[in-house]
Image (spheres, rainbow, N blue to C red):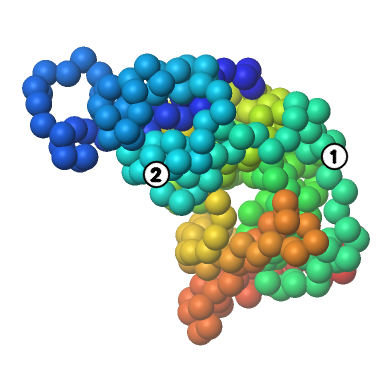
Amino acid sequence: MTQPNELGEFLRSRRSRLSPTDVGLHGSTARRVTGLRREELAVLAGVSADYYARLEQGRARNISDSVLSAVADALRLDDLERRHLTELVRPARSVSSTTSKPLRVRAALRAMIHALDPTPAVLHGPRMEVLAINRAGAALLDDFEAMPPAERNMVHWMFLNPKARAVYPDWSDIAAQLVAILRLAAGRDAGDQRLAALIDEITAQSDEFATYWSDHRVSQHTHGPKRFEIESVGALTLNYEALIPPSDPELRVIIYTAEVGSPSEERLRELLKSRPVDVGT
């Protein structure tokens, strides 16, 4: 991943999704640009057109909290987008980021993932690495622990492994969300060389990834339903919850559960019958 003006690209992408009528501006309908012009956004944010141009070009310095808030208000950013904007303006880490080093997962945390079986559970790193997965998680998704280490990544699997499209009936929605999670991580630490290499690799092999990446959408794992299609048992709808280990806030524990008494609960139980009991690693 090269290091272009990420701030400017994000601002332009958010500006392009707003129309003058969205923000109460009126004028000629003949426009050569999609969305708001720089000058219009500057007026809404209460800054000069020259200053806002320098901001998009990455040439503005010492940006105050009040200006940042005014720009975010003008762009109608949500809370996560505001956080992303702040991280782009004020990177928390240097280029020699510690997150470029391999993660070390506590043995107790890894053991917990396996102890959750027969509830599917996965441990993700900040770059969507699959750091641990239990028997039920592997049955639901894929056997990541049998893959080469470089391929044990949810985004890598989603775009470069054909099985992902078979597992997720809503592949495009899930794929877009994973890219948006990765985009948030990239904004948090522009110096993460391992993340940059991952993005370069997938971009080179997937036009779909490149399209989602250029959208500059940001997201994070929280909770919600997901649909799965498993060849041996059929369709399942499971609810996922993303948990943050207090001592390892850069990691995420993802747990999948079925509604009690639902067909999905029975199918999940059926799926696991042929799998050896998970004793951990």
* Structural distance between the alpha carbons of marks 1 and 2: 33 Å
Kind of residue at disc 1: Pro
Image-based side of 112 in relation to 234, left or right? right
Task: Check disc 2 and give the amino acid type.
Answer: Leu
Q: Quadrant of residue 137?
A: bottom right
- Residue 266 x %, y %: 56, 77
Q: What residue lies at 45% left-to-right and 41% top-to-bottom?
A: 66
Q: Report the disc number at residue 70.
A: none
Q: Dot 2, how many residues are within 10 Å of its Cα: few (below 14), some (14-19), or many (20+)?
A: some
Tally of marks? 2
The answer to whether residue 252 is above or below residue 205 is below
Between 256 and 63, the residue placed more toward the observer is: 63
- Image quarter of residue 269: bottom right
Residue 233 in the image, given as x and y percentages of width and height: 55, 65
Q: Name the outermost residue toward the bottom.
A: 261
Q: Work out which quarter of the rendered image holds the C terminus and state it.
A: bottom right
Residues under numbered marks 1 and 2 in contact, where contact means CB atoms less than 8 Å apart: no
Q: Which quadrant of the structure image shows residue 23?
A: top left
Where does the image place residue 222, in percent across and percent down from the top left? 55, 60
On screen, residue 242 above or below 71: below
Q: Is residue 190 toward the left or the right of residue 72 in the image?
A: right
For marks 1 and 2 on the same chain, the one whose residue lies earlier in the sequence:
2
Q: Residue at x 66, y 30 (%)?
A: 190
Is 96 placed above or below 70 here? above
Name the residue carrying label 2. Answer: 77
Mark 1 = which residue? 102
| 113 relative position to 127: left or right | right
Depicted 78 relative to depicted 32: above or below: below
Disc 1 crowd, CA 10 A, few/some/many (<14, 14-19, 20+): few
Relative placement, left or right, of 272 versus 111 is left
Residue sitting at 58 percent across and 61 percent down? 232
